[in-house]
Amino acid sequence: MMNTDLEQSRFNMIEQQIRTWEVLDPVVLALLKDVPREDFVPPQYLGLAFADLEIPIGYGQSMLSPKMEARIVQSLGLKKTDKVLEIGTGSGYMTALLAKLAQQVVSVECVPELTATARKNLERHDIANVTLATGNGALGWSANAPYDVIVLTGSVPVLPSGLQQQLTIGGRLFAVIGEAPVMEATLIRRVAEQVFRSDVLFETCVPELTGAPQPERFSF
């Protein structure tokens, strides 16, 4: 795609998809202009970099839709002092968005090849405040805990209770909780040592996080 085509597509994405999905924070909108999404998309899908869909990135994984990524970032209210845990690195695009607004990002990916791809993508854009790890982060990542912010980039049928315990007091956790077709994007705040406030932001449906714990099934 020509540069002019890319910029027009980026503009259309922001104006037609993201603003209309209640993402109006000027910091987030500026961030979406600043971080080139097309550089984090597999080459064969370059023409779909700004489309309103989940783009496959291999190994059974996919990028979230642009409006979902933007809504997540807006909901977190990130600060320059925040230490963030991202569970599910993927191609590194969401990682880059988080890193631009936070002090430090720890991102965990269960597919080694995707960790390697994300590392190359982040290095290409001189994003250095990210620590990448390979492993199952569905239950959190205690090695670097506690965190001011935790983000799950895939859905979970049930939220592991241990994740909340890795938050600082005042910390925020974003997760899409439930099973298709009913899932709820939820923001959880740790307001005291053992007190958590949960707010449902909107209903949605996104692919399940690899390694997500499953609810107990009753058999008769």
Image: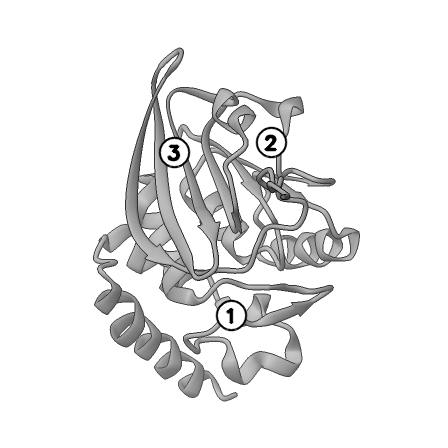
- SS label for mark 2: loop
Front position among marks 1 and 3: 1
Neighbour tally class for label 3: few under 14, some 14-19, many 20 plus, Cα within 10 Å? few
Q: Amino acid at mark 1?
A: Glu
According to the image, label 2 marks what residue? Answer: 140
In this rendering, the answer to whether 148 lies above or below 9 is: above
Q: Residue furthest right?
A: 112
- SS label for mark 3: loop
Residue shown at the point (75%, 54%) measured from the top left: 116
Q: Is residue 112 left or right of residue 36?
A: right
- Which image quadrant: the C terminus? top right
Viewer-nearest residue: 96 or 4:
96
Q: Amino acid at mark 3?
A: Lys
Does label 1 or label 3 sit earlier along the sequence?
1
Residue 81 is situated, as x and y percent measured from the top left of the image, at: 40, 28
According to the image, label 1 marks what residue? Answer: 54
Residue 54 is situated, as x and y percent measured from the top left of the image, at: 51, 70
Q: Residue furthest top?
A: 193
Residue 108 is situated, as x and y percent measured from the top left of the image, at: 65, 41
Does label 2 or label 1 sit earlier along the sequence?
1
Callout 1–callout 3 Cβ contact below 8 Å: no
Real-space CA distance between mark 3 and mark 2, rounded to the nearest whole angstrom: 22 Å
Real-space CA distance between mark 1 and mark 3, rounded to the nearest whole angstrom: 29 Å
Front position among marks 3 and 2: 2
According to the image, label 3 marks what residue? Answer: 80
Residue 141 is situated, as x and y percent measured from the top left of the image, at: 63, 29
